[in-house]
Amino acid sequence: PNQPLAWVRAQMLAHIDPSDTGLRRLYVSRRGDDKRLMINEAELEAELEARGFTVVRPETLPVARQIALFRDADIIVAPTGAALANALFCKPDAKVFEIQPSNFVGIWVRGLCHFVGADWHGFFAPSPLNEREIYIGGTIRPGTSFQWMTPLPAFLDFLDTRI
């Protein structure tokens, strides 16, 4: 059942620039998206930059660059989101730290990490803060857009003890 994923991974990796990006620690920011807003993300980014992480905004990068960044990184930290689909391109033994709001938990990134041999670590942040309802296709759907916060001391301790 994983043969299509293996084929996509091989094809994409074969068709991007093989040059090393030189970036080993990535933080994949969601600050360009107003869905599932982490209200203290700027503070988290500053803490991670102090630990040698490079902050990237995937919506500003070509797909090939995103793939190359994930391919070359040893450690990736990111709030849950679509950009983590690039975990498919991680090298074996890369460490992926996914920060998940507790009301929006999924296992698909963990599955991708397992598939490529990367080491997945999930950190679950209490959420939501000030949840609101929005319309999707004319129907009110609660819980699809909310604000949340990562408890920085707890997360940074979680990260530091695993890297």
Image (tube, rainbow, N blue to C red):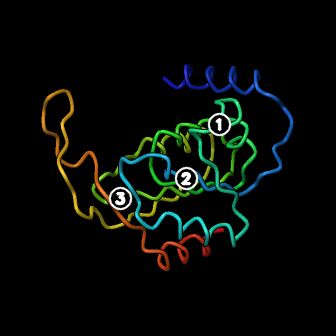
Disc 2 on helix, strand or loop? loop
Amino acid type assigned to the residue bearing label 1 in the image: Leu
Q: CA distance from mark 3 to mark 1?
A: 25 Å
User: Which label lies toward us, 3 or 1?
Assistant: 1
Within the image, what quadrant is residue 52 found in? bottom right
Task: Give the side of residue 51 with respect to residue 42, left or right.
Answer: right
Amino acid type assigned to the residue bearing label 3 in the image: Pro
Amino acid type assigned to the residue bearing label 2 in the image: Ser
* Badge 3 or badge 2: first in the primary sequence: 2
Residue holding disc 2: 29
Residue holding disc 3: 101
Residue holding disc 1: 61
Task: Give the side of residue 23 with respect to residue 9, left or right.
Answer: right
Q: CA distance from mark 2 to mark 1?
A: 12 Å
Q: CA distance from mark 3 to mark 2?
A: 15 Å
* Badge 3 or badge 1: first in the primary sequence: 1
Within the image, what quadrant is residue 70 found in? top right
* Badge 2 or badge 1: first in the primary sequence: 2
Task: Give the total number of marks visible in the rendering.
Answer: 3
Q: Which mark is residue 17?
A: none
The answer to which of 23 and 29 lies nearer the viewer is 29
The answer to which of 59 and 11 lies nearer the viewer is 59
Looking at the picture, how far across and down is residue 43, in whole percent?
A: 53, 70
Q: Relative to 113, say whether 96 is above or below.
A: below
Looking at the picture, how far across and down is residue 115, in whole percent?
A: 56, 38
Badge 3: residue crowd in 10 Å (few <14, some 14–19, many ≥20)? many
Q: Residue at x 22, y 57 (%)?
A: 131
Within the image, what quadrant is residue 61 found in? top right
| Whether label 3 touches label 1, CB < 8 Å | no
Badge 2: residue crowd in 10 Å (few <14, some 14–19, many ≥20)? many
